[in-house]
Image (tube, coloured by chain):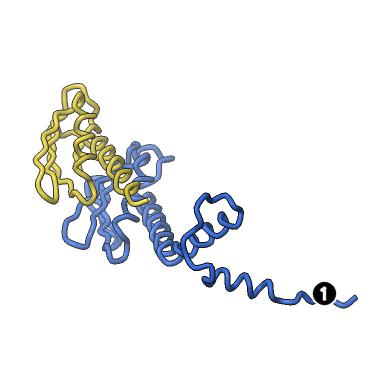
Chain colours: A yellow, B blue
Amino acid sequence: MPNGEALVFSITLSHDVYTPAAIEQATRAFHELCEVETDAEEESTLVRLRRKAGSPTAVCDDFLNYALELSVQELLTCKE
Amino acid sequence: MHSSSGLFAIHDDVLSIDLEEGVYSRDAVLRTAYWFTDRCYLYIARLRPGWLCVQFKLKTQKSDPAVETLEEVAGEFLNSLLDHQLRRDIESETGQIRELLVTKAFAEAGVLEDIPPGDPGDPVDEAYSRESAFVRIEPAT
């Protein structure tokens, strides 16, 4: 998980947990708080987050929570 | 700081739990994690096939004595996960019967525009007709 002090952070998001659509939507939502680069592969996406100056230290954690929430909504509402 | 209890491990204020999907399905893990995003930062990783690793970090400062600890949150998460998994198992075992009963109830109330699919002589109707064939014995006065 991200260290709050780190300015740059990389993490791999598995697509069966974090859907590509959720990652894309979270990337758009957080573009003012951090620079997000994504490298999508077949089963996962590598996400590189660079916190912008003045952004909260927990912005990377918030990004992950937001992506998870969107993904869960997408995955579970599709099933119901 | 690093500690391990067998159930989970804590390293640098991040608690990790490894969950086997044969026991806890991905849906149950996701459903449970969703309800914890207001209290914790969560990250779910697939480190190897058939296993999910859930990592937690508290949102609030742990210096506040009123704030629950990572271990408490993790314990609550595991209980909640078990609850979700059990609900899912029961749903898969009894879901069809429940749907049938609801469909029958609506059909009998006459609120459905279309006749529900299925055989009118199915077990639900059979049970109903058997019950109505019984002779009610009034208690002797």
Q: Where is residue A45 shown, x and y percent of the image?
A: 13, 44
Give left or right: position of A37 versus B131: left
Residue under the point 62% across and 70% down: B128
> Which quadrant: the C terminus of chain B?
bottom right
Residue occupying the far top of the picture: A54
Residue under the point 25% across and 59% down: B18
Q: Secondary structure at mark 1?
A: loop
Q: Where is residue B127 shown, x and y percent of the image?
A: 59, 73
Total residue callouts: 1
Residue under the point 35% across and 50% down: B31
* Nearest the eye: A44 or A34: A44
Residue under pointer 1: B138
* Nearest the eye: B126 or B77: B126
Q: Which quarter of the figure has residue A60?
A: top left
* Nearest the eye: B137 or A54: B137
Q: Residues within 10 Å of mark 1 (few under 14, many from 20)?
A: few
Q: Which quarter of the figure has residue B57?
A: top left
Amino acid beneath label 1: Glu
Residue under the point 55% across and 69% down: B124
Residue occupying the far right of the picture: B141
Give left or right: position of B132 versus B12: right
Q: Where is residue B68 shown, x and y percent of the image?
A: 40, 45
Give left or right: position of A27 versus B25: left
Q: Where is residue B133 shown, x and y percent of the image?
A: 69, 75
* Nearest the eye: A80 or B10: A80
Give left or right: position of B100 versus B32: right
**Disc 1 is attached to a residue of which chain?**
B
Q: Which quarter of the figure has residue B129?
A: bottom right
